[in-house]
Amino acid sequence: MNDRLIQKLKNIKLIISDVDGVLTDGSIYIGAGGEEMKRFSVEDGAGVALAKVAGLKIALLSGRYSSATDIRAKELKIEDVYNGMLNKIPAYEELKQKYNLEDSEIAYIGDGLIDLPVMEKSGVPISVRNAYSPVKKAAMYVTDKNGGSGALREAVDLILKAKGLYEKAVKRLTKKIIKTSSG
């Protein structure tokens, strides 16, 4: 990791993630009855929890509407979910205004062409390893993990380590888990 990236990561207060291709492997399963299913990684769920205990905000911004995305977001207690937004800029601007942030305080994780406009605005554009080539070129950081395999968790870890918050967040989350499970 270069010094320029570390300095930019230190400013991050909000992580916005695409869903299909980042939190999932991009596959959509449709059953005979029309029900849709997606596979989400528990590692990304742990990354969301870690980000939250460290004080980072998490938002989901999906180009395609999916009830599975709503269900997963509710499970992870993610309040800011924009589901079915092909033009992602209005949602990005709304989040920026809601949290009174500058572009430099936002990281965006994407994988597809519709993510490029938001990536170009965000302070730290991140792509998953298996992203479309132009998306990887636009990214300041490309994850070692593929979408759907813990890429969000990797990005959260990266940001928390740059901010010097990783160890403290892990301890805080561990205590929270022990407290929740014991009483």
Image (tube, rainbow, N blue to C red):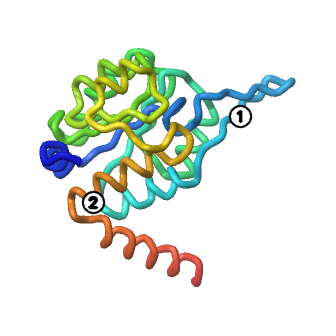
Name the residue rendered at 44%, 27% in the picture: 111
Decide which of 76, 3 is in the foreground and name it: 3
Work out whether 173 lies above or below 17: below
Foreground mark, 2 or 1, reads 2
Name the residue rendered at 45%, 59% in the picture: 49
Q: Residues within 10 Å of mark 2 (few under 14, many from 20)?
A: some
Quadrant showing the C terminus: bottom right
Which picture quadrant has residue 18?
top left
Mark 2–mark 1 distance (CA, rounded to whole Å): 33 Å
Percent position of residue 106, x then y: 24, 39
Q: Judge left or right: residue 24 versus residue 145.
A: right
**Badge number at residue 175:** none
Pointer 1 residue: 37
Percent position of residue 121, x then y: 22, 25
Question: In terms of sequence position, does the residue under pointer 2 or pointer 1 come before the other?
Answer: 1
Percent position of residue 97, x then y: 21, 34
| Kind of residue at badge 1 | Met
| Kind of residue at badge 2 | Lys
Which picture quadrant has residue 85?
top left
Pointer 2 residue: 161
Q: What SS does tag 1 mark?
A: strand
Which picture quadrant has residue 64?
top right
**Do residues under tags 2 and 1 come within 8 Å of each other at their CB atoms?**
no
Name the residue rendered at 66%, 36% in the picture: 38
Q: Residues within 10 Å of mark 1 (few under 14, many from 20)?
A: some
Name the residue rendered at 47%, 27% in the picture: 62
Q: Judge left or right: residue 26 versus residue 126.
A: right
Work out whether 105 lies above or below 137: below
Percent position of residue 81, x then y: 45, 36
Q: What SS does tag 2 mark?
A: helix
Decide which of 144, 32 is in the foreground and name it: 144
